[in-house]
Amino acid sequence: LGGCLPDVPAVTKSKGGVVHIFHVGTDHCLYYKSWNGVAYTPSESTYESLGGTFRGTPAAVSAGKGEVSCFAIGHLDGCLYHYHWTEESGWAKPEKLPGLWGSSLSAVSNQDGHWDVFGIDINGLNNSVFHRRCIKGTWSGWQDLKVQTAYRPTPISHSPGALSVLVIGMDSILYVRVRDATYGDWSDAGWVANEG
């Protein structure tokens, strides 16, 4: 499929069945291509350059039909950048979000127009997982979820509005935290260990 990748790509599928592929190149630029089940755009062997200077693996998510978002960490400033594309308007101007992010981005959408983004703190000293949420274009604050991990958090949505986050703790135990689908708050039970 072309490209020169120092890290793994980020892939998501929109409701219309289109597969979206993003990666950060060796030149730190963000690159994109899509697959509609018949052909690649711009082509099988080339990518569209979205510019910027980034590091690590981006996170991709689709929150509805005919649209896709990509999140990436600035190579020099450690800020979170949001790229959004729609069939009607194409690529919007990249959005720079406050807060400093370290690594291990992941993102999920649990209903149309909603995104949740997770990553590890910029210092990397205590490996805390941080989170931001977007609802219809309005972002929440920078939230420390009070858990430490050396690995990428895994958010899962099994039904509209529902969200669970899984992390492997520094003790190598799997922990899960759930957000209430009705009220949108994290469970009072906190992180629950799943030892096995």
Image: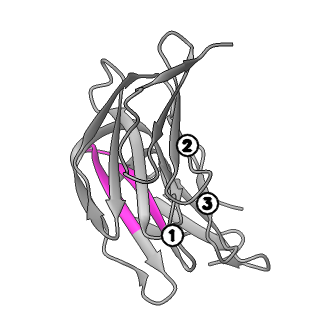
Q: Nearer the viewer, residue 66 or 114?
A: 114
Badge 1 is on which residue? 68
Badge 3 is on which residue? 12
Label 1, label 2: how many angstroms apart (C-alpha)?
Answer: 23 Å
Residue drawn at (31%, 40%) of the image: 101
Type of amino acid at the residue the image marks with label 1: Val
Q: Tell us which disc is closer to us: 1 or 2.
A: 1
Q: Nearer the viewer, residue 76 or 64?
A: 64
- Read off the magenta span: 69-83
Total marks shown come to 3
Badge 2 is on which residue? 6
Q: Secondary structure at mark 2?
A: loop
Residue 160 in picture, x, y percent from top left: 55, 60
Q: Quadrant of residue 53?
A: bottom left
Label 1, label 3: how many angstroms apart (C-alpha)?
Answer: 8 Å
- Circle nearer the N terminus (1, 3): 3
